[in-house]
Image (cartoon, rainbow, N blue to C red):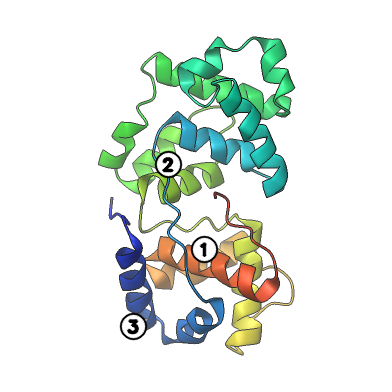
Amino acid sequence: MNLIRNEADIDEGLARLVEIDPFLAPVIAAAGPVPLRLHAPGFEGLAYIVVSQMISKTAANAIWARMEDKGAHSASGYLACSPELVASFGLSRAKAATLEGAARAIMNGDLDLDGLSGLSAAEAIGMLTALKGIGRWTAEVYLMFCLGERDVFPAGDVALRAAVGHALGHVLGHALGHEVRPSIAEVESIATRWKPYRAVAARLFWAYYATCMGRNAIPIN
């Protein structure tokens, strides 16, 4: 994998993106600071992404605080929790089952999250999505924020799609601008021009979404 490790890598990526696609310069100016937000790889990082999917930051952080309090933020700790204790965390049944499956795969040696960094992005995504309940979005976000992969773009993310459409139409005056969210296929196609810095572009558009559209929707704190 091509990796992002620090703020300097973000700055370099933004500079390279402007060289690749000069239309991004006003988006960068409008978005303001683009955060790094790297987290340690492993069950804890993957679990937080699963917990936070499709719910508010406030709700996700409340659930996560209860899990941490009971030691359920590690694979072994999660499996040590009784069904009654897991139910008290506030997870949906689907998320609880996903976390149990991931924890068992880790403890059984069927999933080596640390070893994913030695694979290509496509291989790592394939291994993660082989787990029941782990979809492509979760896998891509894990690669971005826990492994530091530089060239993934979670086109299925609703906020990213909205930000790309808004920026193209309102900041760039681009013919591809959308008043509604562009489709996943459209965003995937647009993002191909930002290779091999698509994860920097994704961070940029999440920052743009927060600054220009009034909501912080980046999927990890």
Residue at the location (30% across, 45% down)?
120
Lower sequence index among marks 1 and 2: 2
Which amino acid type is shown beneath numbered disc 2? Ile
Lower sequence index among marks 3 and 1: 3
Image-based side of 2 in relation to 100, left or right:
left
Residue at the location (42% across, 45% down)?
39
Circle on res. 125: 2
Q: Tell me how far mark 1 sits from mark 2, CA to CA.
A: 16 Å
Q: Quadrant of residue 218?
A: bottom right
**Does residue 163 lie above or below 121 as drawn?**
below
**Callout 3: SS:** helix
Circle on res. 188: 1
**Where's residue 71, x and y in %?**
54, 21
**Where's residue 63, x and y in %?**
67, 33
| Callouts 3 and 2 close, C-beta under 8 Å | no
Q: Tell me how far mark 3 sits from mark 2, CA to CA.
A: 28 Å
Which amino acid type is shown beneath numbered disc 3? Glu
Looking at the image, is mark 3 or mark 1 nearer the viewer?
3
Residue for badge 3:
19
Residue at the location (54% across, 50% down)?
221
Report the front residue among 184 and 98: 98
Report the front residue among 173 and 68: 68
**Where's residue 187, x and y in %?**
56, 66
**Callout 1: SS:** helix
